[in-house]
Amino acid sequence: MCGIVGYLGNNKAYPILVKGLLRLEYRGYDSAGVALLNEEVNVYKCKGKVSDLEEYVKDFNTEGSVGIAHTRWATHGEPNYQNAHPHYSMDKKTALIHNGIIENYATLKTELIKRGYVFQSNTDTEVLIHLIEDIRKNENVELFEAVRIALTQVEGTYALVVISKEHSDSLIVARKGSPLIIGIGDNEYFIASDGTALVEYTKEVTYLNEEELACISLKDGIKIVSISNIERTPYIEKLEMSLTAIEKGGYEHFMLKEIHEQPKSISDSMRGRLSTKKDVVSLGGIIEYEDKMLNAKRFIILGCGTSWHAGLVGEHMFEDLIRIPVEVEYASEFRYRNPIINEDDIVIAISQSGETADTLAALNLAKEKGATVIGICNVVGSSIARATHAGSYTHAGPEIGVASTKAFTAQVTLLALMALALAKKKGTIPNSRYHEIITALENIPKQVEETLKYDNDIKEIAERFTNAQNFLYLGRGYNFPIALEGALKLKEISYIHAEGYPAAEMKHGPIALIDDEMPVVVIATNKGTYDKVVSNIQEVKARKGKIIAIVTKGDKIVRDMADYTIEIPETEEMFVPILATIPLQLLAYYIAVNRGCNVDQPRNLAKSVTVE
Ligand code: G6P
């Protein structure tokens, strides 16, 4: 949450910073601000989006080739001018932006107020700038050393950038628990929360490790030290990202583009890992840990939001194919309930961003207790990817829309590959069956493409239900997580209340909500508990609810009962979740567009939740 950008070089900083903010706006969009180093440090900030900032800054001086900028998702203090970043030091010579939370800010603030510091905002961040200034003056040290000492006194998480009039040729950056990437150009440097903000300028990047800070100057390059003052040489890496992947490419919204990218993103997640000709599924990233995984007594899958839903699908796949018990937990609950973890447990942490604070903390807890932790992340080099023992990337490409779509289907694909690779090795699946399943998986991208052709039909259904107040989503077995995911998509972007429920549980409560106004989306595909779900549809119809059914191509029974049907191609039961989720993404998308909602940046949400 919160996007940060910094620039140091010989070009005009302002346009680079604003463009960077626009790319990072998915991380938060309550307020935005910029600080430019000219003769003075000029801070311009306002409530609202980056476009509001641009409008506000129009009449000011935006010269300067050193600067920092921030787009905020409020944690402490309401989104307004005062609380927007950057924050100034009292003498206005130094400014700072921050992503994360300073947990002991109240204690530090009381101390600093006693020492005469006057606070302009209600943020936790502002303590940092005054603390740095206080240390600089009292201990008579340079700014970089003052930042280092200050960070030994703060508890919490941070990615921060500091600029100062007195060090006009340098930027100071630091990170712990929040992401930060340094791009290296031709005698210029770019700082950002992630690669999307700098990929158009450079692909040479370096990352800070946890609890490290760096002084970046045009004269001396990058100097990295740990908070405990141990220096290390920066390691330069190549950023694997293309500019076209982070642009809308003719679509009205990133979300629609990402929904339509799924045939490709699913193929990309399988590339080099599945071969029906050779009859193998192999994940290079976990190969060394396969034996350990096969000998596990239990798998624990951790995630939040949509990633947790992918985990629920994975539970079915792993138990069906490898016959090892699986528990799926919200990372946020797991970390606070003193879980019983053994050394022969395998924990799988799923995260699109690889930065979700709860997932990171939960996996670290599991690690401390001796478990082996495997990651399934989309963002290469992310904190979760680096904190795990091993793992596999989903390779879905950058996902910009706040509501996750292509990352979800790639996560489910990855879990399927993992389950299949392990099942083959364990011998829990006959060769002929294994071949059938991997052939079906290979076919999925084509079938997703077929499903996407129903786009216009779904648009029409969306029109009919644009003004609904509530929605119910039902599914069983493999399709229950898809009911949850369908409901989440609708809630996130259209603000319609929606609940996902196991179809058979409906009669224990939600059935009381059904009347002739209530749309009920039922995933009623032809495998598993199809007959039972058909009965559940009849129960809804008897109460005059409106049925929107996702059915297998050629289905007649449900078609006759439902008010609206959307067909998906026939596949193995375990891959139905991938296909069935596509129409639900489109349904949520078109309803939200009809309601005039901001689809890519829904209110109150952020793509990467780096706070608890
Ligand atoms: C936020 C996003 C969701 C995402 C969840 C977990 O709530 O808006 O789309 O599913 O975080 O994020 P992760 O990056 O860990 O998958």
Image: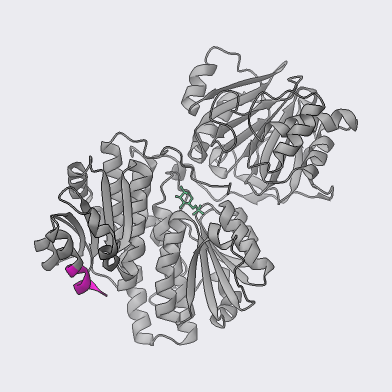
What colour scheme has been applied to the protein in the rendered image? one colour
Any part of residue 450 in sight: no
Residue 413 sits in which quadrant?
Answer: bottom left
In this rendering, is residue 468 above or below 565?
above
Q: Is residue 498 above or below residue 429?
A: above
Horizontal and vertical percent position of residue 515: 17, 52
The residue under the point 51% across, 40% down is 27
What kind of secondary structure does the magenta stretch mostly adopt? helix
Percent x, y of residue 377 = 53, 58
Q: Quadrant of the N terminus?
A: top right
Whether the magenta-drawn stretch holds residue 531 is answered as yes
Q: Residue furthest left?
A: 560
| Residue 64 among magenta residues | no
**In the image, is 592 to the left or to the right of 224?**
left
Which residue appears farthest toward the top when viewing the image?
59
Give left or right: position of 305 versus 469: right
Residue at 38 percent across and 77 percent down: it is 277
Question: Between 7 and 415, which is closer to the camera in this rendering?
Answer: 415
Numbered disc total = 0
The magenta region covers 526-535
Q: Residue 92: give x, y in percent of width and height.
A: 73, 20
Q: Nearer the viewer, residue 512 or 583?
A: 512
Residue 514, percent from left and from top: 20, 54
The residue depicted at 54 percent of the width and 33 percent of the height is 21
Q: Is residue 350 visible in the rendered structure shown here? A: yes
Q: Is residue 545 left or right of residue 263?
A: left
